Amino acid sequence: MSGIKRPNEKHLMLCTGRAFPELAEEVADLLHVELVPTRSLTYANSEIYVRFEESVRGADAFVIQSHCAPVNEWLMEQLIMVDALKRASAKRITVVSPFYPYARQDKKHAGREPISARLVADLYKTAGADRLMSIDLHASQIQGFFDGPVDHLIALPVLADYVVSKYPLDEMTVVSPDAGRVRLADAYSDRLGAPLAIIHKRRDPNKANEVAVGEVVGDVRDRVCLLVDDMIDTAGTICLAAQTLKERGAKAVIAAATHPVLSGPAAQRLNESAFEEVIVTNTMPIPDEVDIPKLTVLSVAPLIAEAIQQVFTDGSVTKLFEGAHV
């Protein structure tokens, strides 16, 4: 009887939403599993329907969804998928959100504002998620919003290793585009053995997505400057920072950021910017209409696959990032 697979034996099942199935397919190939066949529909009134077309009873289920635009639609689809898994008796459900939705709304800046990042965590839990996995959260305190284990993955090794393979480290300075990213820039500085510089940024509270750059603290003249951030949204901040570095005598400016949100004027700004190369990962898809020749996209599928494997086998996710914590 020992060779017979019992019905309740733990087995890994990988599910994906419709936002970016290509990433899930890459993860599935690395794990040597098939994606769970899923019927997903959006009705004429915009309501979403999901049904898994094979049994998930007793499964260790992982639900991958990238939260690109329209964020609300893909978040709702993922919540519905979690609910369907719970009602179908999956043993454990892990939400895999490479780019955590509403991560920038992690605190109250003024009265009568929501903390939407906390609300999203509550929605995941209420839907039936037991565990949360994400990459480079915008704010580390989001880990405390979810009532359960949170695997905070770090893309720094993926991005930094590419930089090492292409650029001379003895000429490099790591630059934080503002005070809020200093901790991230410091982690890159440690990893690359490069000095650190900081751009002091002032933001106009009356103008969304518009910034004013102040002074550069650190030596950037005749240096290859690596600007680092967790995401590039409209690209206003990072392009202005690149221009500032060139004006201060930087030999070349490159960027490394985990999440390519690339909203609105981002493509035009990056194409017209002082950057020689912009390096991002595939935590979310690059829209077909976005054409940025200087953009390099690195895959985080191996990182996600390894983390899923460690969770499934009750191994250590932390060991994947020893020496790379942000």
Image (cartoon, helix red, strand yellow):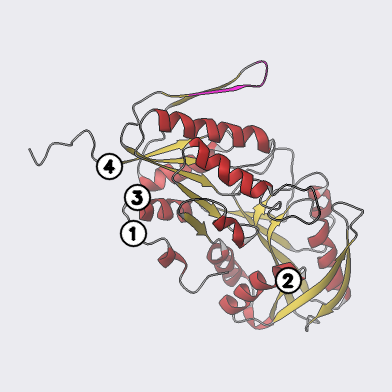
In the image, residue 51 above or below residue 105: above
State the separation of the CA atoms marked 1 and 4: 15 Å
- Nearer mark to the viewer, of 2 and 3: 3
Q: Which residue is mark 2?
A: 176
Q: Which mark is residue 10?
A: 4
**Residue displayed at 41% across by 28% down:** 87
Residue under pointer 1: 315
Q: Are marks 3 and 1 in contact (CB under 8 Å)?
A: no
Disc 3 crowd rating (10 Å Cα; few below 14, some 14-19, many 20+) is: some
Residue 123 located within the stretch drawn in magenta: no
Question: Which three-letter amino acid code belongs to the residue tagged 3?
Answer: Phe
Q: How many residues crowd around disc 4 within 10 Å: few (fewer than 14), some, or many (20 or more)? A: some
- The residues bearing labels 3 and 4 have C-alpha atoms spaced at a distance of 9 Å
Q: Which mark is residue 210?
A: none
Q: Is residue 284 left or right of residue 249?
A: left
Q: Position of residue 126 (x, y in %)?
A: 52, 38
Circle number at residue 312:
3
- Tell me, yes or no, if residue 257 can be seen here: yes
Which image quarter: residue 7? top left
Q: Secondary structure at mark 2?
A: strand
Q: Earlier in the sequence, mark 1 or mark 2?
A: 2
Reply above or below: 264 against 238: above
Image quarter in which the C terminus is found: bottom right
Q: Residue at position x 53%, y 41% from top?
A: 124
Residue at 82 percent of width and 67 percent of height = 241
Observer able to see residue 65: no
Mark 1 and mark 2: span between their CA atoms? 34 Å
What is the residue that sits farthest to the front in this orientation? 111
Task: Tell me the amino acid under the disc marked 4.
Answer: Lys
